[in-house]
Image (tube, rainbow, N blue to C red):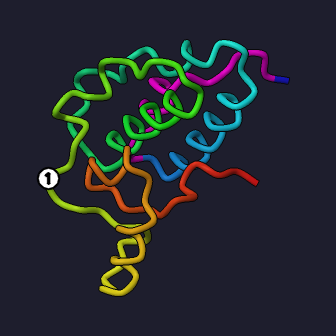
Amino acid sequence: MRNKRLHINEVAEHIGEKDFGLYFGQFLDDYHHAENKAELIEEEPDKELESSEQLCLLAATADRLAWECSIGAPPWVHKKKYYLSKPCFAQATRSLEYQELLRNESLPEFSERNLFYGGNILDRL
């Protein structure tokens, strides 16, 4: 049994790996069960990581979770490297209709970073 909660900067260590999604999901579960939620998002991912879709996803996630829990977003989430210049859509869709749906439904913390995954990106079963 794991006693330690996964921090968002630890998830960033798995960017580019095929199991990144598993770490991301575990982080969401840990966050929702944590007593000190701010602690799990306060530390910035490795500053040497270059901007990427997954890195921006983590910043948008920290920003949104902080808003949902009425805790201050950590300052690192607003750095320029956490904003993409070109849009990224769920499942890399090329369907213009689906892209429009994703643009309309995406959470503001994601859409402002050009991430369009829909409104349920942070939902867990």
Q: Quadrant of the C terminus?
A: bottom right
Q: Of helix, strand and loop, which one carries label 1?
A: loop
Is 57 situated above or below 34? Answer: below
Q: Nearer the viewer, residue 38 or 24?
A: 38
At x 71% / y 16%, what residue is drawn?
A: 4
Q: Which secondary structure is most common in the magenta stretch?
A: loop
69 is higher (above) or lower (below) than 94 = above
In the image, 89 versus 22, the foreground residue is 89
Mark 1 closeness class: few <14, some 14–19, many ≥20 residues within 10 Å: few
Position of residue 24 measured from the top left corner of the image (x, y, whole percent): 56, 41
Residue sitting farthest toward the front: 70
Identify the residue shown where x is 34% and y is 39%. Answer: 55
Left or right of 41 on screen, residue 116? left
Residue 73's image quarter?
top left
Instruction: Locate residue 96, reporting x and y percent.
Output: 30, 85
User: Start and end of the magenta stretch?
Assistant: 2-16
Residue 50 falls inside the magenta stretch: no
Q: Quadrant of residue 31?
A: top right
The amino acid on which the numbered mark 1 sits, given as a three-letter code, is Ser
Query: Where is residue 95 drawn, in percent x and y?
Result: 34, 86
Which corner quadrant holds the N terminus?
A: top right
The residue beneath circle 1 is 85
Instruction: Give the residue displayed 31% in from the left and 18% down from the top.
Output: 75
Residue 13 on the magenta span = yes
* Vertical comparison of 80 with 75: above or below: below
Residue ID at (39%, 40%): 60
Residue 41: percent from left, percent from top: 49, 21
Q: Is residue 20 left or right of residue 1?
A: left
